[in-house]
Amino acid sequence: SIDAMATPAAGFTARDATAPVSPTGRVHRLDLHVQEVQREVAPGVRQQLWTFGGTAPGPVLRGRIGDTFEITLINDGSLDHGIDFHAGALAPDQPMRPINPGERLVYRFTATKAGIWMYHCSTMPMLHHIGNGMYGAVIIDPPGLAPVDREYVLVQSELYLGADSQPGDLATMQAEQPDAVVFNGYVAQYAHRPLPARAGDRIRFWVLNAGPNRTSAFHVVGGQFDTVYREGRWQLRPGDAGGAQVLDLVPAAGGFVETVLPEAGDYPFVSHVMVDAERGARGVVAVR
Amino acid sequence: SIDAMATPAAGFTARDATAPVSPTGRVHRLDLHVQEVQREVAPGVRQQLWTFGGTAPGPVLRGRIGDTFEITLINDGSLDHGIDFHAGALAPDQPMRPINPGERLVYRFTATKAGIWMYHCSTMPMLHHIGNGMYGAVIIDPPGLAPVDREYVLVQSELYLGADSQPGDLATMQAEQPDAVVFNGYVAQYAHRPLPARAGDRIRFWVLNAGPNRTSAFHVVGGQFDTVYREGRWQLRPGDAGGAQVLDLVPAAGGFVETVLPEAGDYPFVSHVMVDAERGARGVVAVR
Amino acid sequence: SIDAMATPAAGFTARDATAPVSPTGRVHRLDLHVQEVQREVAPGVRQQLWTFGGTAPGPVLRGRIGDTFEITLINDGSLDHGIDFHAGALAPDQPMRPINPGERLVYRFTATKAGIWMYHCSTMPMLHHIGNGMYGAVIIDPPGLAPVDREYVLVQSELYLGADSQPGDLATMQAEQPDAVVFNGYVAQYAHRPLPARAGDRIRFWVLNAGPNRTSAFHVVGGQFDTVYREGRWQLRPGDAGGAQVLDLVPAAGGFVETVLPEAGDYPFVSHVMVDAERGARGVVAVR
Ligand SMILES: [Cu+2]
Ligand SMILES: [Cu+2]
Ligand SMILES: [Cu+2]
Ligand SMILES: [Cu+2]
Ligand SMILES: [Cu+2]
Ligand SMILES: [Cu+2]
Ligand code: NA
Ligand code: NA
Ligand code: NA
Ligand code: NA
Ligand code: NA
Ligand code: NA
Ligand SMILES: [Zn+2]
Ligand SMILES: [Zn+2]
Ligand SMILES: [Zn+2]
Ligand SMILES: [Zn+2]
Ligand SMILES: [Zn+2]
Ligand SMILES: [Zn+2]
Ligand SMILES: [Zn+2]
Ligand SMILES: [Zn+2]
Ligand SMILES: [Zn+2]
């Protein structure tokens, strides 16, 4: 089982949470290799993850309204897998079909609506495939989105441990007994390797809840959100009198929040579903 | 227990999910008979359900702001039952009182606010009465609601099995261990009897989460919501740059979403709380 | 364990749910004593609670945008405790640090954004400190907030019982098995000591969900919300055509709703997560 307070090894490198910039050009081509890999998910705890591109979450894609994404999915694994991009609208039958090991397919969609959209494996049982690492985010910028000083992407998900170095356990997924809840795939990684910022920076957090099962209540300790964008809509803007303390996201929901952390210090962030914070859904923004 | 992947018998007929049209006239009178009935809730699984009108969910009622509903509740069952309509504002004492088997009462309310409103049995323990089938929806149209090509109503609820042909189990309701999560009362019925549509149709899904306990994250695979109306408010309209991938509904919350499914194909819909999708909260829109 | 239907002793006094008025003056100073106290949390059930000021929830604070709060936290307990006010933005390092028994600190913040903000103990494990009583609310009025006839504050939280007169049980908090869910710290207290109102009163309910773990679905039976303000934003106003039946709040979220209860009668309120209503998240507004 997982000790959510354990310290990673000295050489531990956290996943880079920096949001990618939108590529120039309007057609984005990507080979996405499904890989069944051994990964550490908490200090000293290894699992076989099913991944898009070798990491869970998979790569963060980004573009603008009108952009076309042409993804070549290549199944390098030993099981059937497929992919479902919420960022595009199309008939699922062909592009989302499971493919055999060794096969490939091309999934082409044009983004017509802004938001942060989930993608995930489309092979049944999806609970198992999402729960074992097959999820990621596509950001489609709202028109006129202002630049900020720092922009991070955090994908919340749950871990349900299997035996050492084996895939996650479907039975505990079905029983809703997660062993950990994490941002970007590793227990409390940003508590140990904080996200950097400077005092007075405007920071945007894109947050996607990949689930598979639990609601997220994203909160930054010491911060207040003056900007909230959720499931395609602005809820709060800096000129508004009100502020928000949480961004609530059911599984497959996403959005972003912005805050200005006023002075140097360590600002934790959590899912304020407190049992999940203690299971690993926590990190730190180190403001210097 | 329930096999959520089982196939119904050849003669299985799914509940018609088509939204009713608003009756003409401004006073809507209805006799609503409480009936304790045997029903199949999943392939080969029968339960005694407590129902409004013989089905769970009960009938979908519809009207406009200013309409009066005059419901005669007739208790044909063996237990006390009552009714609570969220669609109207009134003192609960008399209209929501439990009535004995063989009794009747008249519940009269005038709709003053738009939305999709839950109704349910008002007899304690409500967890048991709602959990065993006594729930339904009243739609009060927002003024100026545009016509669409297809309009469906989906009520999400949970099943907690009792013994064969007996009522649902209060203990598992209290322990929050559902045996299934369903749309319109039957495990995955629209996976087997898909909802029809044509390519390019604008489809409106009215969704009510009857609970009793779980949050819903309604999603259409391959679709994006360009319109979201939730708990009395428009969240997204087609001209907005943003889109939504889920409609999040706590128990007793409701709303509607709209999408245009662009091409022929089978578009699954789910609660993206993935364990619930696998428990039966899934169906298909068959676009031809 | 707790009998959620039990009747309190004749001398039982419910916590006053009336919202405080904003103090005049723009600097609010308060000594807040952490006290580990014996309290009844349900009829005949006593626990050792960890509290801010002797009660769980702690005192409701209130002010306006621009006001400064200067809180002196005094640890009269036997364990380390600290405090985190969501109502202010600042570096957590010093003001939120845990202090030893016998120590004190001054926590000074200026409110710049409106809303109902959680405060809670900042000492690890926060799950245990919040789950054992260390939470409360700060109301910062939105500019131009209209006066109403009645204004109540309800803080939802969970109870996880320890042994008689001992602190709450961390293991059941971690296992998410609450013994009760309550408004203002005591099982169903306002079912036994209803909140008073008069027919036609406009009533505002400020609601904060302290969690630590469960989502709230606040509903007033027989009422409809014509006003919804949630996490810093107006969702509905009285002139809108739509109405709301629930206010949904993940842990650490808050807002207010308004309703006019039209006639004399007893109007129950609940979390419509029905298992929680039956665990004690219920009360009554007695309209005379
Ligand atoms: Cu907090
Ligand atoms: Cu905090
Ligand atoms: Cu999906
Ligand atoms: Cu999907
Ligand atoms: Cu209700
Ligand atoms: Cu009700
Ligand atoms: Na983290
Ligand atoms: Na905070
Ligand atoms: Na279905
Ligand atoms: Na999709
Ligand atoms: Na109460
Ligand atoms: Na009601
Ligand atoms: Zn490869
Ligand atoms: Zn897969
Ligand atoms: Zn560390
Ligand atoms: Zn009859
Ligand atoms: Zn009943
Ligand atoms: Zn079938
Ligand atoms: Zn003292
Ligand atoms: Zn404490
Ligand atoms: Zn009583």
Image (cartoon, coloured by chain):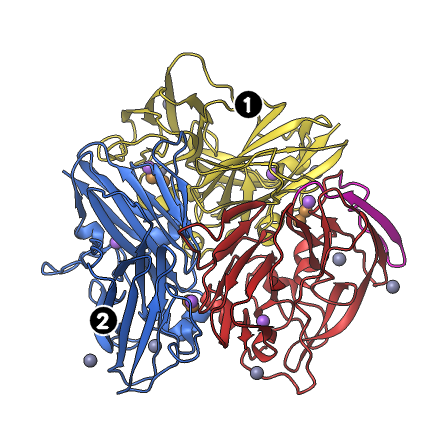
Chain colours: A yellow, B blue, C red
Residue at image position (32%, 56%) is B140
Q: Position of residue C73 (x, y in %)?
A: 83, 54
Q: What amino acid is labelled 1 in the image?
A: Ala
Host chain of mark 2: B
Q: What amino acid is labelled 2 in the image?
A: Leu
Mark 2 highlights which residue? B30
Residue at image position (32%, 75%) is B107
Left or right of residue A222, residue A167 in this image: left
- Give ligand 14's quarter of the image: top left
Where A201 falls versus B60 (above or below)? above
Q: Position of residue B50 (x, y in %)?
A: 29, 75
Where B78 falls versus B23 (above or below)? below
Host chain of mark 1: A
Left or right of residue A177, residue C210 in this image: right
Asked whether the viewer can see residue B162, the reply is no
- Tell me where residue A37 sits by quadrant: top left
Res C98 label: none
B135 falls in the magenta region: no
Q: Are marks 2 and 1 in contact (CB under 8 Å)?
A: no
Mark 1 highlights which residue? A146
Q: Nearer the viewer, residue B244 or A16?
A: B244
C104 falls in the magenta region: yes
- Tell me where residue B3 sits by quadrant: bottom left
* Residue numbers of the magenta segment: C91-113
Left or right of residue A271, residue C57 in this image: right
- Tell me where residue C213 sits by quadrant: bottom right
Residue sitting farthest toward the left = B11
Which part of the image, by quadrant, shows the C terminus of chain A?
top right
